[in-house]
Amino acid sequence: MNNSQSRPIQLGRISYTNAWPVFHHFDPEALPFRTEVHSDLPATLNRKLKIGDIDMAAISSYAYGISSDSYYVLPNLSVSSFGRVQSILLFLKSPLEKVLHGKIALTTASATSVNLLKIIMEKFYGGKPTYEDAEPSLENMLENADAALLIGDHAIRASWTNHGYRVLDLGEVWNLWTGQWMTFALWAVRKDAAYRDPESFQAIYEALIESKGKSSRDMGPVIRKAMDQIGGTEAYWQNYFSHLCHDFGPDQKTGLQLYFQYARELGLLTSEPDLSELPSPTRNR
Amino acid sequence: MNNSQSRPIQLGRISYTNAWPVFHHFDPEALPFRTEVHSDLPATLNRKLKIGDIDMAAISSYAYGISSDSYYVLPNLSVSSFGRVQSILLFLKSPLEKVLHGKIALTTASATSVNLLKIIMEKFYGGKPTYEDAEPSLENMLENADAALLIGDHAIRASWTNHGYRVLDLGEVWNLWTGQWMTFALWAVRKDAAYRDPESFQAIYEALIESKGKSSRDMGPVIRKAMDQIGGTEAYWQNYFSHLCHDFGPDQKTGLQLYFQYARELGLLTSEPDLSELPSPTRNR
């Protein structure tokens, strides 16, 4: 294993609960080479991976799509749902008829869900709202907007408050219209890093798959951590995680390719993203 | 009180649970004149009231709209919801993208919900599906169609089965888009009958209002009857009835007028319906 590089491998870890099952049992200290872990919001990881500050991260699917030439996908890892996802929510202060030609305040925390929202509003519903970036605070966002998009733990916390707004679950709307899976995040590695040190990235990949497997056999530890750090009941989190899928097989890929196609039709993407997987350097070591 | 007519007053009673709270404590035997009660599906009552086989009935709001010149509304009675109604459901076998240009099988049991569906599919979603009348059996309907509309107790029973289809609640979609109430049924009396015998119809009206009031103070008897006759749990029916409203005030009227306006825009109605209320013959007897 090539461990001669001077800089430790830089890893990005989505801080949202929806990615926890993959990361929970992943221990970079147990790897036989040096790593540094950046725990952050998807948008920050998207940017850091793009400029090479980190080498490998869970990032927004859309961020993968616009830079796919520079990345490999880690096989069989994602944050996906077939229907309700419960943490990518549009809160509507005005009726949808008005929202479609009104103003929507957007969280700046991600990219996939912002573009999914545009697909839903413009392609599915035939609207043309204006969009405005905002800090993820529901009340502030809705002071000057007809609707507000929140994702991840901000969306979850807001869904628990007695807010009185109508709510659209973007995973549910996507599935209703297309009948497809939606993939919100992928694990990506920079091609230049993978060329430099293929065996280390293969080892990280295997450790992530092992961590995901442990979580899927017993969600208890992840659920307890969520209750400690975010709040909510055990039943809430059990239900929440049961609607998430962390695989990336043919079905999830078909759904994501349709998302990319619609994004191209709206001019949100210019070319067809390449979903090449990280090549395995030593299939039978 | 004028009780000289030879034919008993003919009353129509919607057989669906959603109208039970108004009818449950209504006892025509206690009235000081003769009546006959027809318990039936909305579509049958719509037809019978129109041709004069019955004099007064709970009917579909749309059926009221197309014949409003011949009818008075009974004040403050309706079947309405502000959002989810849980018994007017579109079951989707295909993704909505396909349904919008595919085939939808329709229950023939009502008129309001069929036209509400057309407003949603064509005006809100920009589709142009074909529609086909069918008996209210989910599996048979979906054999040759992309989606199926069921209402009332047929919809409730189908929602309890493990059907695997996506479901749109038409009350919820209406409220999401418009921010308005939706009124599914109204109590109507033929004007000719009301002119003939105003005091009897006033007495029937007052008995219905009294029955509605009793139900709203204690839903227990209605819930027990629903469990006996339809099945389901007490919690289901408690939740179900809590989402229904049997008043017809300014808010419900505004929502219904918007529904009528959209129906006119789609050519489903030709003129603006008149919502004149049954005049009170003797306000202080």
Image (spheres, coloured by chain):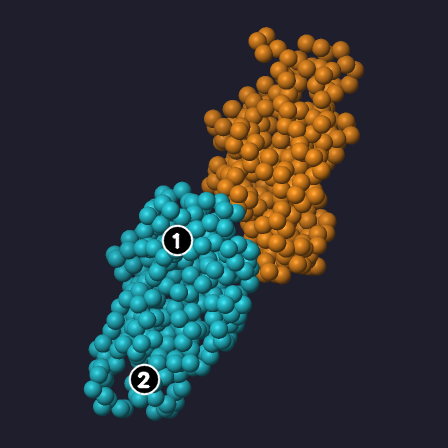
Chain colours: A orange, B cyan
What chain does mark 1 sit on?
Answer: B
Q: Closer to the observer: label 2 or label 1?
A: 1
> Quadrant of the image for the C terminus of chain B?
bottom left
Identify residue type, mark 1.
Answer: Ala
The image quarter containing residue A99 is bottom right
Q: Distance from label 2 to label 1 (Cα)?
A: 37 Å
Q: How crowded is mark 1: few (under 14 residues within 10 Å), some or many (20 or more)?
A: many
Disc 2 target residue: B193
Identify residue type, mark 2.
Answer: Ala
Residue A274 location (% of width, % of height): 66, 28
Disc 1 target residue: B105
Q: How many marks do you count on the picture?
A: 2
Can marks 2 and 1 be said to lie on one chain?
yes
Residue A264 location (% of width, % of height): 67, 40
Q: Which residue lies furthest to the top in this view?
A: A285
In what element is the residue under mark 1?
strand
- Residue B207 visible from this viewpoint: no
Q: Is residue B227 left or right of residue B101?
A: left
Residue A262 location (% of width, % of height): 62, 42
Q: In this view, does A154 lie above or below A196?
A: below
Residue ID at (49%, 76%) = B271
In what element is the residue under mark 2?
helix
Residue ID at (51%, 70%) = B264
- In terms of depth relative to the viewer, which is nearer, B224 or B101? B101
